Amino acid sequence: MELRNRRILLTGASGGIGSALAQRLAAAGARLALVGRRHEALAQLASSLPGASIVVADLATAAGCRAAVEQAKASLSGVDVLVHLAGQGSFRCFSDEDPDAMEQMLRTNCVSAMWLAQAVLPQMTARGDGQLVFCGSVLGALALPGYTVYAASKFALRGFSEGLRRELADSGVSVTYVAPRAVRTALNPPEVYEMAKATRMAVDTPEAVAEQILAAMRRDAREAVLGWPESWFVRLNALWPALVDRAMRKQAEVVRRFAKPHPTQQTQAEQQTS
Ligand SMILES: NC(=O)c1ccc[n+]([C@@H]2O[C@H](COP(=O)([O-])OP(=O)(O)OC[C@H]3O[C@@H](n4cnc5c(N)ncnc54)[C@H](OP(=O)(O)O)[C@@H]3O)[C@@H](O)[C@H]2O)c1
């Protein structure tokens, strides 16, 4: 896709990967509506990107997604491309997850993609032109200990992207699913980076990931799994999951050494032992 003069709704723009991508999209000549919850972070980013507008919205609700699309359409006079990066992370053992936080994660990481797509698609299909870009994760095809709920949200997002791409095949609207491996941003708590250091797990910079997302958008990629050997493990997991189960047997113990319970679960555990 040629990006010059494209009207792009970019969610997660206030985040690590999002702000790096916003700079690159603006440099490529795109016109941007930057979406996030933190007004100050968006305003600071927009001040360095000529013509960019900002939209403050909570995408964990249907009303927030609809409002974000309406505001973006109003400020850009339409939306040609949706790039949906907004997401939240979780690194903890499943027994330490908070029930409400699990639901919030599924809404933020997956259902929001459906709400946003429903709001932008009518205009795109009517024109017979458009692009939807969804940011998943390597964990959306290769679930690992410590990431059960996050992986579930990204598996769901990948399934949605795949189904929608096939449903829109004759519409002129393309669907691109990108799956980064670990990236050094505020999404991950410090213990993820401690584990990465101890286990020599690769961690990419947000700038490098933004470059790869930009490249995937330009070539209208259907799916881009970023990083080697992670992309190879994704294939192995699809073909021989039992083999990966065996290779991962010791990983749960490693995760237990680093991961911390959700604060609400920590308090409950303390109350039960006192
Ligand atoms: N970092 C990694 O290791 C990694 C690896 C693979 C995939 N990814 C994916 O990459 C994407 C970007 O993540 P990142 O690493 O750049 O994380 P980040 O720096 O924490 O940024 C997250 C972004 O999502 C927005 N967001 C979160 N909840 C939201 C909500 N309810 N409503 C509206 N906006 C919301 C945040 O906005 P505010 O801060 O303004 O609320 C922020 O702009 C995510 O989809 C993530 O799952 C990340």
Image (cartoon, grey):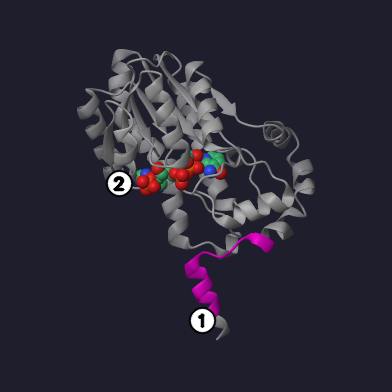
For this view, does 169 lie left or right of residue 41? Answer: right
For this view, does 265 lie left or right of residue 46? Answer: right
Which residues make up the magenta segment?
256-271
- Where, by quadrant of the figure, is residue 141 drawn? top right
Which is more toward the observer, 4 or 86?
Answer: 4
Between circles 2 and 1, the one closer to the viewer is 2
Q: Please tell me in which quarter of the rendered image ligand 1 is found.
A: top left
* Crowding at mark 1 (Cα within 10 Å: few <14, some 14-19, many 20+): few
Rendered residue at 43%/36% (across/down):
18
Residue 128: x and y in percent read: 34, 13
Residue 223: x and y in percent read: 56, 25
Residue 269 within the segment the image draws in magenta: yes
Residue 206: x and y in percent read: 52, 37
Q: Which residue is mark 2?
A: 40
Q: Is residue 274 visible?
A: yes
Labelled disc at residue 271? 1
Q: What amino acid is found at the position of numbered circle 1 in the picture? A: Gln
